[in-house]
């Protein structure tokens, strides 16, 4: 366990330090779209460790609505980039 002391994340969180998954202000469907898209993007492009904490999420009924789906796609791209950077550069080492 002493070898884990140099890691830049809090065990159990499964996300890089400084990564904010809080939805921006907006209507409930907008916020749900952001949360679902971000979790999906982060889980899809991060390493296998992150896949233990995050999964692909999309509400099939809400995906037919423009407001939900547009922010879902934007959040997916944003969080996927964070997942790829964390996987490639390590936990918090890209700053």
Image: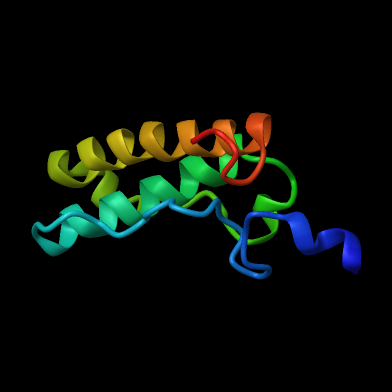
Q: Nearer the viewer, residue 4 or 87?
A: 4
Q: Is residue 61 visible?
A: no
Q: Residue at x 9, y 57 (%)?
A: 26
Q: Say above or below: 13 vs 88.
A: below
Q: Nearer the viewer, residue 48 or 6?
A: 6
Q: Nearer the viewer, residue 19 or 62?
A: 19
Q: Say above or below: 43 vs 52.
A: above
Q: From the viewer's perspective, is 53 left or right of 19? A: right
Q: Residue at x 27, y 59 (%)?
A: 32
Q: Residue at x 23, y 41 (%)?
A: 71
Question: How is the rendered protein coloured?
Answer: rainbow
The percent position of residue 6, horizontal first and vertical second, equals 75, 56
Q: Nearer the viewer, residue 94 or 52?
A: 94
Q: From the viewer's perspective, is 32 left or right of 50? A: left
Tell me where residue 28 sits by quadrant. Answer: bottom left
The percent position of residue 25, horizontal first and vertical second, equals 12, 58
Tell me where residue 4 sits by quadrant. Answer: bottom right
The percent position of residue 95, horizontal first and vertical second, equals 49, 36
């Amino acid at each position: 366990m002493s070898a884990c002391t140099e890691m830049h994340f809090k065990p159990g969180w499964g996300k890089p330090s400084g990564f904010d998954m809080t939805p921006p202000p907006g209507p409930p469907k907008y916020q749900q779209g952001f949360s679902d898209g971000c979790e999906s993007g982060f889980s899809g492009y991060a390493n296998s460790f992150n896949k233990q904490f995050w999964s692909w999420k999309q509400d099939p009924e809400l995906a037919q609505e423009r407001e939900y789906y547009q922010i879902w796609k934007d959040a997916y791209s944003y969080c996927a980039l964070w997942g790829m950077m964390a996987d490639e550069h390590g936990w918090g080492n890209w700053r």
